[in-house]
Image (spheres, rainbow, N blue to C red):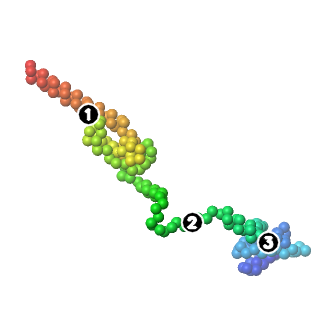
Amino acid sequence: MVKVRCPSCSKTLNVPDKYAGKRVKCPACQETLTIPVVLEEVVAEEDFAEEVVPVKPRRPAPRVADDEEEEEERVAQKPVRRARPVDDEDDRPRRKKRRKITRGEWADCPNCGYSDATRVRFAWWGGFVGPLFINTVRCRECDTNYNGIHGDYNTVRILIYVLVGLGFTVVVSVGAAVAALSVLK
């Protein structure tokens, strides 16, 4: 073991002989120091528990172009971004900025995932009441009708709504027919 004093923090370190002549970091202050080569063996008076971490060799510096022409070629190969002119009188067509998509009032469309929809006011299967009762909305992107609360298709809900309406109509019609027949007797 080689006994070394860190020049930065003055801490005494016991370093194994295998690091003699190499550079290591001080575990206390991380300062890099060179371990001297000792010809005779020195007996350590104190045994320290700290271990010294060897320094990894640094990578060689990147190659610098010797020739000015090489430097000019390298600069010429880089694409140059041009600043956009501030002139508002420019007649060139420009791309429209994409509208920022925000979470709409209704659930996302199950067909395309778009978040903007409008309420359906009238439907052939339910008139004005059916779409309001089932919360039917239409996607502004793909024109799909779906449930605005749950975000799924209304097929089962529409079927139930229509069958209940037909059932109610049948019951009322049969009741009216029975009442008319009983009056005639």
Within 10 Å of disc 1 (Cα), the crowding (few <14, some 14-19, many 20+) is few
Residue 72 position within the rendered picture, expressed as x and y whole percent measured from the top left: 71, 68
Q: Say which residue appears at 84% left-offset and 67% top-offset.
A: 18
> Label 3 belongs to which residue?
23
Label 3: state its secondary structure.
Answer: strand
Splitting the image into 4 quarters, where does residue 103 fall?
A: bottom left
Residue 82's disc is: 2
- Which residue in the protein does label 1 denote? 165
The N terminus - image quarter: bottom right
- Depth order, front residue of 77/25: 77
- Which of these two is toward me, 149 or 86? 86
Mark 2–mark 1 distance (CA, rounded to whole Å): 67 Å
Q: Which mark is residue 146?
A: none
Which marked residue is nearer to the observer: mark 3 or mark 2?
2
Provide the secondary structure element on which disc 2 rests: loop
Q: Nearer the viewer, residue 12 or 119?
A: 119
Q: Quadrant of residue 66?
A: bottom right
Q: Position of residue 160 (x, y in %)?
A: 32, 34
91 on left or right of 33: left
